[in-house]
Amino acid sequence: MARRVVVTGLGTVSPLGNSVAETWEGIKAGKNGVGSITRFDAKDYPVTFAAEVRGFDPLPWISKKELKKMDLFIQYAVAAAFMALEDSGLKIDASIAERVGVIVGSGIGGLPAIEEYHKVLMEKGPRRVTPFFIPMVINNMASGNISIMSGAKGPNSCITTACATGTHAIGDSMRIIARGEADVMICGGAESVICPTAVAGFAAARALSTRNDDPAHACRPFDKDRDGFVLGEGSGVLILEEYEHARNRGAKIYCEAVGYAMTGDAFHMTSPPPEGEGAARCMAKALADANMKPEEVDYINAHATSTIADAIETKAIKSVFGEHAYKLAISSTKSMTGHLLGAAGGVEAVLTAKTIEEGILPPTINLENQDPECDLYCVPNRAEKREVRAALSNSFGFGGTNAAIVMRKITD
């Protein structure tokens, strides 16, 4: 029999704040994390705004010496991981180190450092490229640094599945614990690519909103006037723990992680199939993995990125949940945080755990003219108090990769 998995720690760095408390307060208040790009001069770019992390100070977790070896996505991951560990009260010592693992993924990795050191190479030559360049940019160094700095010696890996990265990292970690390969997993996602190449590339793909004259209202999931996603950054990390292990040490338990699934669309590089068949199979399989009926789910943290795919995700939800789709609540927290790419699933899993814990539904802000094709209850503009027995969090990535996790209130 598979072992039970619970959530005992949460950590975030996000455009709404540099802690879970700040981020969650921003979510409940319907705060907007989008503004003009400050990382570089974007005035000549097709898109001039993003959801940046502001006021981040890595020094409580990372020394100045070590900072020189880490691009920003790694810094965010380390900070979020240590926030989550502190929240969990878990002390990693020799007695448990080999039973604690890390999977913190990134969709793109150290693109800003690649830009920077390519410029150094071209202008100053190969001898001026830092010896830390490769460890700064490769995706698995988020997990690697967390392991080194925390002493976690268990399973150590990295997921890179575009926008589904964080959710896949959490789901795979659930399975590692369930089958007995670890007792604790530090898991989630991190991303920081608000840089010229990424903005130019996503803009060229016509994926981004171009509402440069009104960035505060640019991210508008489920709205008829949506025109693309808003690039965001940050990290979301959870501590997952085997139930008895958590109970024996008296840990606080936010909720139980009960279901996970992943599927492939086999359709298109960047677009989902028009009926959302892959997403629907993913949600249905996650519910089956949780041994739950659709009627037991009260809330879905939707992938909904403020693109045409919002309507496709709505179709997928209807196909899985039937009439119950009109009774549950769905919302897109990306309306406030922007789209954090590989970090999205991690941050959204943190927010889903808080939703279950506090019984507060996150709003979908900027929902002023709801698309008739997105006709479910999307918690428009204001957070609501409602008991949430169980919730599902969706993440769908380029390449047609889908992930869904199910969490519920702990029952005993």
Image (cartoon, helix red, strand yellow):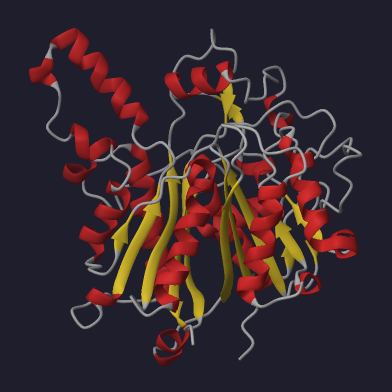
Residue 223 in view, yes or no? yes
Q: Is residue 245 left or right of residue 288?
A: left
**Residue 279: horizontal and vertical position, in percent?**
67, 50
Residue at image location 59% in from the left, 18% down from the top: 47
Q: Nearer the viewer, residue 228 or 364?
A: 228
**Residue 139: horizontal and vertical position, in percent?**
33, 43
Residue at image location 14% in from the left, 11% down from the top: 124
Q: Nearer the viewer, residue 302 or 316?
A: 316
Q: Is residue 28 left or right of residue 52?
A: right
**Residue 62: horizontal and vertical position, in percent?**
26, 50
Q: Nearer the viewer, residue 310 or 123?
A: 310
Residue 186 sits above or below residue 141 on the image: below
Q: Is residue 86 left or right of residue 63?
A: right
Residue at image location 36% in from the left, 79% down from the top: 183
Quadrant in the rendering for residue 244: bottom left
Count of labels shown?
A: 0
